Each structure stands twice: as structure tokens, then as C-alpha cells.
């Protein structure tokens, strides 16, 4: 099992139905304690992380303990994001839904209509009843598929595709609302985001509902613009109030961003998640793939090692202080409501010879959940 990663800090808008305006964020992000990177160096992607998964900067003895320097620089560790300055007592009392350690247990293949090679998980709702996935043809064109099912262990049968008129699409995650009735997709050039809706599960998303209006603060107005904001890897929280994404226009530093939803339904201007363990290493990023339903655990793909990672927030605070490698073979991990399962893109069948996820091309992949 790849061992857990050590501490890093960031602050988030916690439990607020709609954060204030784009002119003043009610939350701040704090840098992590050491400034050390998971990989330890800017070495090439295939050599940054050892097979053991051990952290280059912190011993296993420290893996569950935040250091004294983990406190935010302003000395405030409580939930300062709430409008009245108080801490969310329920959040403080409850442990994270997601476990802090995982073993490389056997995975279960999801029953869904899929291609022979190259499928990739794009989104799964927290109740596991709606799933989206991607296929890429020989020319590189990406198709977004989606399907519903009646129960979490049933097969996905009827499959629809997002109309190509809304594309072309990039080969990355999309976002689904908790009820499966809203989908957010990025354009292939990452210059725009589009939201589509449908009336009920078991029906198709209506292309006539497509709109980019909620994202004006994130992508800007391209008319007459000389530069663009490039947005990808969209991840929506279960309560619909946080939107995580990757700022692909940045070529250094932290590219992971979080925007709160405003009362008018638009997404506020984003705040970067400042933590060196989420910063770029050479040309490789840390890209969000999922957020737990209690918003205490952030799932992301570490491109430096092609490893799925998780970052845990301290309950009752706005700080993520622990980073872990997610052990089950696969990438683009996405949790369920109770976090008793995590869905991933994995090799089909898995290659157990090296205990990890390979990136050979062409890669026969499909969607699994663990356990």
C-alpha cells in the first residue's frame, strides 16, 4: 500500500449556503507547513514517486500528526468562513466520512455499456444512480456518455450522449449535481464552461437548456479579449455550493481553484488553494477529481506520479492538514455519499504485476469501484 502523505493547509468556505460577493471572499487559503513537495523534486513524471509510496519529506511516524507549524499564519483555526464567525458544531463533532487509510483491495467492475478500450470515468453522483464517462475515437474526438440506474448495484442500461453540438469536449472530468439533473462540461479549448439540465432521471439532458451564464466570473467575457482564463477538471460539491477546477492558464504554482456559488446562481471569482503539495511540479499538476459529500475530503489526481490522492480537512476548521495516497489501482477517484465506495478508472483486467496503475497506450480501461 502506498503510504499516506504529510500535512498541508488550505482554507475553504465552509457550510455557507451562498458566500458573499466577488469583491470580498469570506474565506482565505493558507500555505502548508513545510513547503515541501510530495515528489521531492521536479524530476520526470515516471520517477517522482517510489513504488512504496512513502513520502519524501515526512516519515511514517508523523503521517497522522499535524506539526506545530500547521496552524494558519493568522492563528485562527476555527471556521472563519461562516457569516457570523462561529464554528459549524455538527461538522466539528462528526469525523470524516472517508477513511484515512486504504488497502489495495480487489475492485468490482461496474456494469455499464462501454467500449473495448479507453473508457474514462467522468462523474458519478453521490447516490451512485447517475454516471458519466468518456470515450475517445481514433481521431481524438471525445464523446460524453451518461446513464442512470435504479439501484447502486444494478447495471447501467440505457445510455445517452451529450450532443456534439455542445462540444468539442476535453478528455477530463465533468460535474454532476447530486440529483443527477445538472451537468457542467468544459470546452476542448478550456475557454468556456457549459451547464445543461434535464427534467428527471431517465431522460436526456436538453441541449436547449445549455448556458454559460453561471460561469462569467470564472471564464470572463471572450469578446475582444486578448487572453483567456482556461478552466478544466470541474468538480461540484454535493450541496452545490463549491466548484473546484484546474486553472490551466497557469504554468507554475498552485493551479487548483475553488469558487463559491452566489445567491444569483453564478459562481464567484475563484480563490487558489495555496499549498505547495498541490502546486505544479515541472509541467505536472494536481487536478481535482472528487469531493466527499461532507466536504471533508478532497480527491485529486497527482500527475507527477499518475496517482490518486486525498486531502483531509480538520473537522470544525477550514484547514486541510493531511495528504494520503489512495491505494486501490486506478485513477480519477470519486467518492460515494457514505464514502463506503470510491469509483475509479482502472485497467480491465488490472495489471497486478507492479501493484499500480499503468499509463501505457493504448490502455484498456473501464470503471470500477472499491471495495
Image (cartoon, helix red, strand yellow):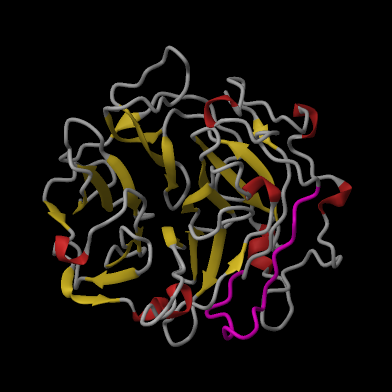
Q: Which region of the structure is painted magenta? A: 14-33
Is residue 321 visible in the rendered image? The answer is: no
Q: Is residue 31 magenta?
A: yes
Could you tell me residue 95's position as x and y percent?
64, 51
Which of 238 and 301 lies nearest the eye of the viewer? 301
Q: How many marks?
A: 0
Which residue in the rendered view is the most extreme toward the left?
A: 158
Look at 19% across and 73% down and name the residue there: 199
Q: Quadrant of residue 82?
A: bottom right
Whether 312 is drawn above or below 259: the answer is: above
Look at 69% across and 45% down and name the residue there: 322
User: Is residue 37 found left or right of 218 in the rendered image?
Assistant: right
User: Is residue 157 found left or right of 226 in the rendered image?
Assistant: left
Could you tell me residue 316's position as x and y percent?
70, 62
Q: Quadrant of residue 231?
A: bottom left
Which of 342 and 8 lies nearest the eye of the viewer? 8
Quarter of the rendering occupied by the N terminus: top right
Which of 223 and 169 lies nearest the eye of the viewer? 223
Whether 287 is drawn above or below 189: the answer is: above
Could you tell me residue 229's position as x and y percent?
46, 68
Is residue 267 visible in the rendered image? The answer is: yes
Look at 55% across and 62% down and name the residue there: 257
Which of 201 and 173 lies nearest the eye of the viewer? 173
Quarter of the rendering occupied by the C terminus: top left
User: Is residue 21 found left or right of 246 in the rendered image?
Assistant: right
Q: Is residue 241 magenta?
A: no
Whether 193 is drawn above or below 39: the answer is: below
Look at the magenta stretch and give its main secondary structure: loop
Amino acid at each position: 500500500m502506498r503510504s499516506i502523505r504529510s500535512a498541508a493547509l488550505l482554507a475553504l468556505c465552509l457550510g455557507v449556503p451562498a458566500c458573499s460577493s466577488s469583491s470580498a471572499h469570506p474565506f482565505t487559503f493558507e500555505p502548508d507547513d513545510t513547503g515541501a513537495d510530495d515528489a521531492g523534486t521536479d524530476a520526470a513524471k515516471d520517477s517522482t514517486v517510489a513504488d512504496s509510496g512513502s513520502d519524501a519529506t515526512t516519515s511514517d511516524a508523523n503521517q497522522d500528526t499535524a506539526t506545530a507549524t500547521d496552524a494558519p499564519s493568522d492563528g485562527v483555526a476555527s471556521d472563519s468562513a461562516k457569516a457570523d464567525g462561529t464554528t459549524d458544531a455538527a461538522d466539528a463533532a462528526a469525523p470524516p466520512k472517508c477513511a484515512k487509510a486504504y488497502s489495495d483491495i480487489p475492485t468490482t467492475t461496474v456494469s455499464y455499456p462501454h467500449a473495448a478500450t479507453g473508457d474514462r470515468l467522468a462523474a458519478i453522483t453521490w447516490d451512485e444512480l447517475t454516471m458519466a464517462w468518456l470515450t475517445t475515437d481514433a481521431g481524438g474526438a471525445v464523446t460524453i456518455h451518461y446513464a442512470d440506474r435504479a439501484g447502486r448495484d444494478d447495471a447501467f442500461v440505457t445510455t445517452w450522449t451529450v450532443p456534439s453540438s455542445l462540444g468539442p469536449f476535453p478528455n477530463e472530468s465533468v460535474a454532476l449535481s447530486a440529483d443527477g439533473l445538472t451537468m457542467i462540461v468544459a470546452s476542448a479549448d478550456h475557454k468556456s464552461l457549459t451547464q445543461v439540465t434535464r427534467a428527471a432521471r431517465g431522460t436526456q439532458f436538453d441541449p436547449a437548456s445549455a448556458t454559460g451564464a453561471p460561469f462569467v466570473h470564472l471564464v470572463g467575457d471572450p469578446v475582444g479579449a486578448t487572453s483567456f482564463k482556461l478552466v478544466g477538471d470541474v468538480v461540484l460539491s454535493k450541496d452545490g455550493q463549491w466548484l473546484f477546477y484546474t486553472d490551466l492558464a497557469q504554468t507554475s504554482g498552485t493551479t487548483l481553484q475553488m469558487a463559491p456559488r452566489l445567491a444569483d446562481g453564478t459562481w464567484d471569482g475563484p480563490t487558489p488553494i495555496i499549498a505547495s503539495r498541490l502546486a505544479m511540479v515541472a509541467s505536472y499538476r494536481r487536478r481535482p477529481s472528487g469531493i466527499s459529500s461532507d466536504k471533508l475530503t478532497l480527491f485529486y489526481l497527482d500527475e507527477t506520479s499518475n496517482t490518486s490522492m486525498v486531502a483531509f480537512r480538520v473537522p470544525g476548521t477550514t484547514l486541510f492538514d493531511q495528504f494520503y495516497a489512495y491505494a486501490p489501482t486506478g485513477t480519477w477517484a470519486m467518492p460515494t455519499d457514505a464514502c463506503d465506495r470510491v469509483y475509479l478508472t482502472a485497467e480491465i483486467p488490472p495489471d497486478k504485476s507492479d501493484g499500480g496503475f499503468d499509463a501505457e497506450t493504448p490502455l484498456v480501461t473501464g470503471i470500477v469501484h472499491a471495495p
